[in-house]
Image (cartoon, rainbow, N blue to C red):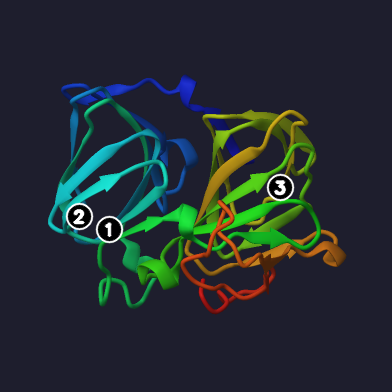
């Protein structure tokens, strides 16, 4: 069965002055070590040290606030519009003047999922608001890719943001060849997990094992927005009803209606190989 919990249920631990960490996805909680996920809460004027092992990779995004990343790749001012990829052996610190909340993910021993791991990996900071917005062919959803082989140079992990307008339903499906999770950023709705239904809300983490059927329905009042990550990046998606296999078309715009930073061609989520641009 999938594992579903809210960050409110996870006890924070102090990892520095003004910094608390909630360990969301752990091997003990999900019985698997392919993905790790933490939630950091930094008070005003706090600093969090970051040290990525040479065998691992990591990424993070700000859920709220702003911060400055200072490390082996220089200084970067960050907002909630940024997703940051940290290559193996990265060392640095994340500091904030007014406070920030951070979603921090990692893949231990990432060479298990990418035979070319480490060959050309480099630090990357992406403004996801400038990335292409893709529109679902069968419903009203929007997809924005956050972490991809094209953007970050590894097939060990892939991530995206999905936006469900009020009252939107996606088709029931499962994945083969990867495990993945969703973290609900905002909104609420219902998760259909096999034969069961569960309410979901902001702050929830849903960990899906391989072969488990799932889909979502957003509530009527506001957008349901979540990020989801797959390890490894390339997997098969199997739809219960092949007639509604999830397909995505380029809108020619970013999420704010402007010119996107690059182009991603139309593609189906049933494809096992990432299309050009992903």
Residue 214: which disc? 3
Are discs 2 and 1 less than 8 Å apart at CB? yes
Callout 3 environment at 10 Å: few (<14), some (14 to 19), or many (20+)? Answer: many
Where residue 113 sits, quadrant-wise, is: bottom left
Q: CA distance from mark 2 to mark 1?
A: 5 Å
Relative to 13, is 72 on the left or the right? left
Horizontal and vertical percent position of residue 275: 57, 77
Q: Is residue 90 above or below residue 214?
A: below
Q: CA distance from mark 3 to mark 1?
A: 29 Å
Callout 2 environment at 10 Å: few (<14), some (14 to 19), or many (20+)? Answer: some
Element class at badge 2: loop
Relative to 90, is 106 on the left or the right? right
Residue 177: which disc? none
Element class at badge 3: strand
Residue 53: which disc? 2
Horizontal and vertical percent position of residue 174: 69, 56
Are discs 3 and 2 less than 8 Å apart at CB? no
Q: CA distance from mark 3 to mark 2?
A: 33 Å
Residue at 54% x, 79% y is 276
Relative to 274, is 38 on the left or the right? left
Horizontal and vertical percent position of residue 199: 70, 28
């Amino acid at each position: 069965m999938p594992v579903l919990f809210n960050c409110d249920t996870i006890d924070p631990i102090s990892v520095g002055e003004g910094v608390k960490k909630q360990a969301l996805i752990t091997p003990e909680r999900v019985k698997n070590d392919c993905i790790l996920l933490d939630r950091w809460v930094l008070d005003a004027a706090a600093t969090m040290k970051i040290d990525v092992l040479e065998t691992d990779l990591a990424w993070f995004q700000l859920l709220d606030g702003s911060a400055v990343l200072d490390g082996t790749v220089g200084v970067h001012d960050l907002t909630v519009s940024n997703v940051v990829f940290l290559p193996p052996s990265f060392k640095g610190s994340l500091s904030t003047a007014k406070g920030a909340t951070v979603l921090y993910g990692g893949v231990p021993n990432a060479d298990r999922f990418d035979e070319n791991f480490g060959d050309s990996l480099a630090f990357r900071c992406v403004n996801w608001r400038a990335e292409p917005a893709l529109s679902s062919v069968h419903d009203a959803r929007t997809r924005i890719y956050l972490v991809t082989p094209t953007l970050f140079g590894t097939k060990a992990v892939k991530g995206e943001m999905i936006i469900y307008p009020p009252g939107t339903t996606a088709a029931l499906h499962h994945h083969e060849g990867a495990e993945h999770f969703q973290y609900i950023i905002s909104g609420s709705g219902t998760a259909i997990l096999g034969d069961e239904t569960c309410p979901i809300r902001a702050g929830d983490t849903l960990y899906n094992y391989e072969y488990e059927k799932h889909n979502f329905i957003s509530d009527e009042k506001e957008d349901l927005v979540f990020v989801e990550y797959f390890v490894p990046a390339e997997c098969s998606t199997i739809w219960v009803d092949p007639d509604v296999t999830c397909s995505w078309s380029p809108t020619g715009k970013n999420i704010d209606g402007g010119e996107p930073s690059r182009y991603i061609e139309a593609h189906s989520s049933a494809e096992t190989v990432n299309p050009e641009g992903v």
